[in-house]
Amino acid sequence: MIVTIGRKYGSGGRMTGEKLAKLLNYRFYDRELLKIAARDIGMHEDVVQNFDEKPAGSLLYSTYLHATLATTDALPLNQKLAFAQFDVIRRVAQDGDCVIIGRCADYVLQGRRDCFNVFVTASDEVRSQRLVQYYGVPEDLVEKVIKKQDKQRAEYYNFFTHRKWGSGSTYDLCLDAGRFTLDGAAELLANAVRQLEQAAKT
């Protein structure tokens, strides 16, 4: 089973996904996708990290170039990086069981029957608390950081998919992780995955 997790900033989606992967003994991919993609396009991770999950330019133009040119050198770096990560997502999915964080993975892998697409959210209060607790974001900056990061993630997802980021109809399950501990949220998702795995065998 391939679990894709979209997440609001500070919701605990990445940490929940990491705990889920450990519970299921699945491979876990987040920043690793960036490292592999950077290597694929011949650039160092430090150079491309600021372009990760950020949109720019015309989707139609970039898609046309990606589909018709032998090389994507003409693309803006962030689009080139995004397409490289999409290729990496397809490759790691071919190897089976894994958890993939963000980067339009649900869209990239659409049509696969072995995908379980999750979106993780939480209240602004919970997200603020988690950002202060786990990431050391100053309390007076939390609201600004949340709005900025959510906006970037939404624009990135909407730009490359023509879907609406966070829309319930796009995902198999939307989880308010603020109602649970991170361990509890991971266990809830693990139970769902186990049921899907069992159903696939019958």
Image: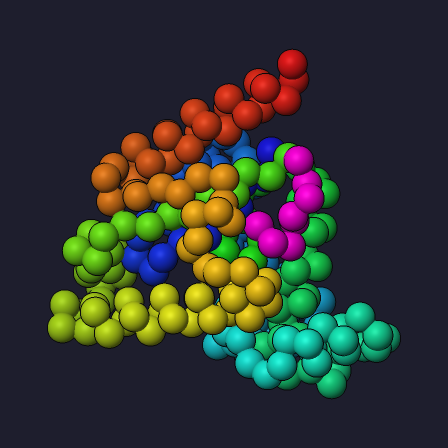
**41 with respect to 135 (left or right):** right
Magenta range: 106-113
Residue sitting at x 37%, y 30%: 188
Percent position (x, y) of residue 86? Answer: 65, 60
Closest to the observer, 143 or 98: 143
- Compared with 161, 17 (above or below) is above
Residue sitting at x 25%, y 37%: 180
The reply to whether residue 194 is in sight is: yes
The reply to whether residue 77 is in sight is: no
**69 with respect to 104 (left or right):** right
Examine the residues drawn in magenta and state their main secondary structure. Answer: loop
Residue 112 part of the magenta-drawn span: yes
The quarter of the picture where the C terminus appears is top right
Percent position (x, y) of residue 169? Answer: 48, 47
Residue sitting at x 64%, y 54%: 108
Residue sitting at x 55%, y 70%: 159
Residue 86 part of the magenta-drawn span: no
Q: How is the image coloured?
A: rainbow
